[in-house]
């Protein structure tokens, strides 16, 4: 997914922002940045996190600033223990844990779940597995080095 970048990686205003926000319309298809295996699918709001249950989830409606959390999100583990994370999806991701994915495969749709002020994709890149705050890297130069512009 290519779109205009919004909030950047660990800015002065948001030092804990471990990714970049890519502005896109609600319902825009979110695609895997590269091939790998899905390692996490979660609903994360207000400091709590749930695996999908098949029933209603707190992430099934729009969030708001200050709520906290990534909303509906998916993580993909790529070769070399690189992990990409895709947050604020409109509904449960279209992939499941353990599922192999290919570059460009649809994995979800842009939404505004979790700590979000409007529709966008929060995208993270991590050099290490599992994904942590300590191994998060700025996705824009990271992807540029891989030959994939954001």
Image: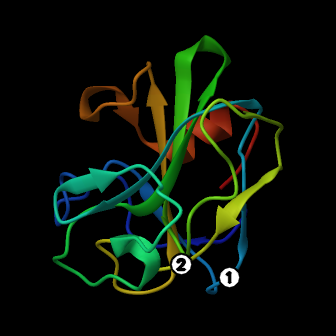
Measuring from the top left, give residue 13's x and y in whole percent: 17, 66
Q: Residue 86: in sight, yes or no?
A: no
* Residue situated in front as seen by the camera: 20 or 48: 48
The image shows residue 129, relative to residue 108, as above or below, that is above
Marks 1 and 2 close (CB-CB < 8 Å): yes
Residue that extends furthest to the top in the rendered view of this protein:
80
Q: Is residue 48 left or right of residue 81?
A: left
Q: Quadrant location of residue 79? A: top right
Query: Closer to the N terminus: mark 1 or mark 2?
Result: 1
Cα distance, mark 1 to mark 2?
Answer: 6 Å
Measuring from the top left, give residue 129's x and y in whole percent: 44, 19
Q: Is residue 107 left or right of residue 84?
A: right
The residue beneath circle 2 is 111
The image shows residue 47, relative to residue 147, as above or below, that is below
Q: Is residue 62 left or right of residue 90?
A: left
Q: Residue 49: in sight, yes or no?
A: yes
* Residue situated in front as seen by the camera: 123 or 99: 99
User: Which colour scheme appears in the figure?
Assistant: rainbow
Residue displayed at 53% across by 78% down: 111
Label 2 environment density (alpha carbons within 10 Å; few <14, some 14–19, many ≥20): many
Label 1 secondary element: loop
Residue displayed at 16% across by 77% down: 66
Label 2 secondary element: loop
Q: Quadrant location of residue 143? A: top right
Measuring from the top left, give residue 87's x and y in whole percent: 47, 60
Measuring from the top left, give residue 131's x and y in whole percent: 39, 30
**Image mark for residue 27:** 1
Label 1 environment density (alpha carbons within 10 Å; few <14, some 14–19, many ≥20): some
The total number of labels drawn is 2
* Residue situated in front as seen by the camera: 127 or 71: 71
Q: Is residue 12 left or right of residue 63?
A: left
Residue displayed at 77% across by 32% down: 35
């Amino acid at each position: 997914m290519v779109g205009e970048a919004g909030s950047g990686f660990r800015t002065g205003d948001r030092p804990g922002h471990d990714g970049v926000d890519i502005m896109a319309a609600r319902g825009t298809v979110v695609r895997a940045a590269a091939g790998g295996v899905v390692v996490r699918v979660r609903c994360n709001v207000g400091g709590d996190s749930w695996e999908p249950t098949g029933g209603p989830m707190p992430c099934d409606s729009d969030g708001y600033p200050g709520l906290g959390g990534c909303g509906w999100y998916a993580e993909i583990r790529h070769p070399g223990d690189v992990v990409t994370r895709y947050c604020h999806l409109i509904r449960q991701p279209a992939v499941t844990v353990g599922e192999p994915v290919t570059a460009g495969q649809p994995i979800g749709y842009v939404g505004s779940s979790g700590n979000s002020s409007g529709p966008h994709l929060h995208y993270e890149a991590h050099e290490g597995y599992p994904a942590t705050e300590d191994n998060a890297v700025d996705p824009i130069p990271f992807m540029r080095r891989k030959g994939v512009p954001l």
